[in-house]
Amino acid sequence: MNATTETRESIYKAVRNGKTDEARKLLSKVVQYQSCSSRNEAVLTRSEIELIERAVNQAGESSNDPYRGEAKLEKLKKRIGQQGALSERIEFLVTVYGCGLLGDLRFGELTNITERDFDTCVEMGDGGEVIHGLIKRALDDDDLLERIIEGEGLDVWKAWHAQYEEIERQITSPLF
């Protein structure tokens, strides 16, 4: 793999993982390099740059923005206390961690969302399944994984991961 391919892959990976700031920085460096380079070596074509800019902007619209996250939590809050709202409870926790709102939640800095709402997500009789869903998402999202470990500590992560593995064993074991 050459430098051009590595750069392109790094930018696309950042976009896929919702790291829009990182993608913008990489893209900016590429554009700056290409404009200052005395060589006729283009890391990315103009059409690739435009395509990446569009992807970065679209990812930024749906990424882990704390302001959008708080609005999303307010919508989810209406359902998290209801039976049968497992996906909403999982999404609530994913949003809290994914948007970096755990500290704000714990310090009462969110307008209409409290720690009680967070607790509700794991106290509706399906807490194990909620944690399973959260961990499943975190295993596919490095940022989410990192934020959970930072927010809860390694001991809680290990306990939650053990709970995840136990549910996975139950799901995959044959029923006899």
Image (cartoon, helix red, strand yellow):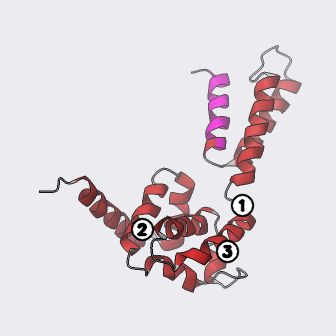
Task: Mark 1: give few (<14), some (14-19) or many (20+) Cα within 10 Å.
Answer: some
Looking at the image, how many numbered discs can be counted on the residues?
A: 3
Secondary element at image label 2: helix
Q: Give percent across and percent down for residue 6.
A: 62, 28
Q: Quadrant of the N terminus?
A: top right
Secondary element at image label 1: loop
| C-alpha distance separating marks 2 and 1 | 23 Å
Task: Mark 3: give few (<14), some (14-19) or many (20+) Cα within 10 Å.
Answer: some
Residue type, mark 2 in image: Ile
- Front position among marks 2 and 3: 3
Question: Is residue 88 shown in magenta?
Answer: no
Instruction: Please name whichever residue, 159 or 173, is drawn nearer the observer in this view of the structure.
Output: 173
Q: Give percent across and percent down for residue 141.
A: 52, 52
- Front position among marks 3 and 1: 3
Residue at (35% x, 62% y) in the render: 164
Q: Mark 1 highlights which residue? A: 65
| C-alpha distance separating marks 2 and 3 | 20 Å
Compared with 75, 176 (above or below) is: above
Compared with 13, 117 (above or below) is: below
Q: Main secondary structure of the magenta part?
A: helix
Q: Mark 3 highlights which residue? A: 74
Q: Which residues are magenta?
A: 2-15
Residue type, mark 1 in image: Asp
Q: Give percent across and percent down for residue 155.
A: 39, 71
| C-alpha distance separating marks 3 and 1 | 14 Å
Q: Quadrant of the C terminus?
A: bottom left
